[in-house]
């Protein structure tokens, strides 16, 4: 919650007028607790995983010959019932595991220094922090993924993620509950090393989900390809 009662008070504290973005942030967040703002990630999670995969899924169900050349496994087809089952399973796991984890992990977010205060970070600050987050997550995720493809890790945990042998966007988060918890650590490590603003944290959370969906879609960069 911002420690200002008005825009004028915030401007006096900053020693300048608020930018347009800062005014919007003040109007939205001034009377909301930091915990409530952090929990927005739960809403983002459900929205992203319910909407971003849809173009890929529609193309898959249409089975248009024009898009077959973009598929990694063009001969593998999934029915609409299989696709919807995957979505339901992912949403159930999100509700039972990811959502509660988000609700309970707020103290760690406060501990590492994710802030909601003014001023807002500059575009360059957000860009550089996101770059660090992606590099740290990619490196640590690689080694954890290698472990999960070992004999014990695969048999006990990672095999669930590979129940869908054909790439499908909805399967990005289709995994054993333990894998969801383990792979949450690389996503959190970057912000822990270089903590930033809550807006940067939100953006990181959204972009990371979109990246996972795109890499599991089976039609990488489909939307950027000329038809």
Image: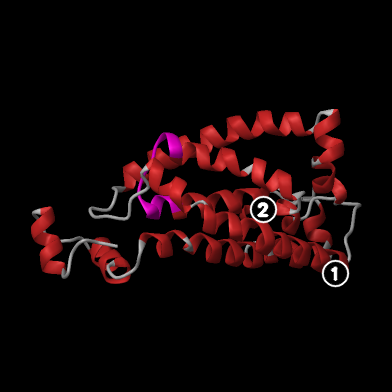
Locate residue 41 relative to residue 37 in the image: left or right.
Answer: right
In the image shown, does 221 or 104 lie closer to the viewer?
Answer: 104
In the image shown, does 85 or 35 lie closer to the viewer?
Answer: 35
Q: Which residues are magenta?
A: 192-201
Locate residue 71 relative to residue 106 in the image: left or right.
Answer: right
Q: Residue at x 70, y 64 (%)?
A: 91
Badge 1 density bin: few <14, some 14–19, many ≥20, Cα 10 Å: few
Locate residue 29 relative to residue 99 in the image: left or right.
Answer: left
Quadrant housing the N terminus: bottom left
- Mark number for residue 213? 2
Percent position of residue 65, x then y: 84, 60
Quadrant housing the C terminus: bottom right
The residue under label 1 is 80
Q: Residue at x 30, y 64 (%)?
A: 25
Please check the rendered image and state whether residue 160 is part of the magenta-colored stretch, yes or no: no
Secondary structure under the numbered disc 2 in the rendered image: helix
Percent position of residue 87, x then y: 75, 64
Secondary structure under the numbered disc 1 in the rendered image: helix
Q: CA distance from mark 2 to mark 1?
A: 18 Å
Q: Main secondary structure of the magenta part?
A: helix
């Amino acid at each position: 919650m911002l420690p200002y009662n008005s825009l004028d008070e915030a401007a006096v504290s900053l020693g300048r007028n608020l930018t347009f973005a800062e005014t919007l942030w003040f109007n939205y967040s001034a009377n909301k607790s930091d915990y409530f703002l952090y929990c927005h990630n739960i809403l983002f999670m459900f929205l992203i995983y319910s909407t971003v995969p849809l173009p890929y899924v529609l193309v898959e169900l249409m089975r248009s010959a024009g898009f077959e050349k973009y598929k990694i496994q063009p001969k593998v087809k999934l029915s609409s019932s299989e696709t919807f089952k995957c979505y339901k399973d992912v949403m159930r796991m999100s509700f039972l595991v990811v959502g509660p984890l988000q609700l309970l992990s707020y103290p760690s977010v406060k501990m590492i220094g994710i802030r909601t205060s003014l001023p807002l970070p500059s575009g360059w600050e957000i860009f550089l922090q996101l770059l660090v987050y992606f590099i740290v997550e990619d490196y640590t995720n690689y080694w954890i993924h290698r472990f999960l493809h070992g004999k014990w890790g695969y048999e006990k945990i990672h095999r669930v993620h590979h129940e869908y042998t054909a790439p499908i966007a909805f399967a990005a988060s289709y995994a054993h509950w333990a894998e969801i918890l383990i792979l949450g650590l690389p996503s959190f490590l970057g912000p822990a090393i270089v903590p930033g603003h809550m807006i940067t944290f939100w953006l990181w959370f959204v972009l990371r989900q979109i990246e996972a969906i795109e890499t599991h879609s089976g039609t990488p960069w489909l939307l950027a390809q000329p038809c």
